Image (tube, rainbow, N blue to C red):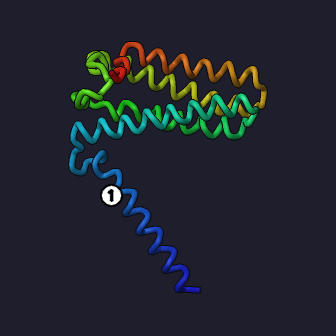
């Protein structure tokens, strides 16, 4: 019985070390390069997009538990956007972040907070299982995303 406790403590310790190591770059360890920040921001934005598509499908199929879970994921990811957008983190030609982000960072942050709130609201509304209300909440979330994209994200370059 005692060996099981030690093993569990050891596993917990290893997990804590892994998590702390993973966030070290953001939490005061060696600072991340602009390229690394850009990669993290891009991965986060793509994950948000993936969850938004899942939301749309789940709502259409009346899978409200799945929609609630996806909306919670969107809220958590959107809340990370300001910390993934430090000044000067636009890296390379693939970066779609506009310099206006840093000129109006408070507004940028307010918009991301509004989107995170809209996603949390959608997660709650999805539990009502009322498709019309859930769809209205989804559209509100989508509009909140667009409000940020228009002033702060460059248009996608088309391949020639």
Please give the residue where the numbered disc 1 appears in the rendered image.
21
Quadrant that contains the N terminus: bottom right
Quarter of image, res 42: top left
Task: Answer with left or right where residue 12 lies relative to residue 136.
Answer: left
* Image spot of residue 130 (x, y percent): 78, 26
* Image spot of residue 12 (x, y percent): 47, 68
| Residue name at image x 37 percent, y 13 percent | 151
Please tell me whether residue 2 is drawn above or below residue 88 in the rendered image.
below
Task: Answer with left or right where residue 60 lies relative to residue 7.
Answer: right
| Residue name at image x 52 percent, y 29 percent | 116
| Residue name at image x 70 percent, y 25 percent | 134
Residue that sits furthest to the front in the current view: 160
Task: Answer with left or right where residue 89 lies relative to residue 108.
Answer: left
Number of marks in the image? 1
* Image spot of residue 94 (x, y percent): 29, 29
Quarter of image, res 154: top left
| Residue name at image x 66 percent, y 32 percent | 57
Please tell me whether residue 33 is drawn above or below residue 105 in the rendered image.
below
Circle 1 crowding by C-alpha within 10 Å: few under 14, some 14–19, many from 20 = few
* Image spot of residue 120 (x, y percent): 59, 31
Quadrant that contains the C terminus: top left
Quarter of image, res 51: top right
* In the foreground, 98 or 53: 53
Label 1's element? helix
């Amino acid at each position: 019985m005692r060996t099981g406790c030690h093993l569990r403590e050891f596993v917990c310790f290893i997990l804590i070390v892994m998590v702390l190591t993973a966030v070290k770059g953001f939490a005061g360890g060696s600072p991340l390069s602009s390229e690394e920040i850009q990669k993290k921001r891009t991965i986060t934005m793509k994950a948000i997009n993936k969850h938004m598509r899942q939301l749309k499908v789940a709502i259409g199929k009346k899978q409200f538990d799945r929609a609630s879970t996806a909306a919670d994921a969107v809220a958590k990811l959107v809340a990370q956007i300001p910390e993934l957008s430090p000044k000067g983190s636009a890296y390379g030609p693939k970066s779609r972040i506009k310099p206006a982000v840093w000129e109006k960072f408070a507004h940028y942050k307010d918009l991301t907070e509004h989107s995170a709130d809209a996603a949390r609201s959608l997660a709650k509304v999805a539990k009502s299982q009322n498709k019309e209300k859930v769809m209205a909440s989804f559209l509100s979330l989508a509009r909140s995303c667009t409000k940020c994209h228009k002033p702060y994200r460059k248009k996608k370059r088309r391949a020639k």
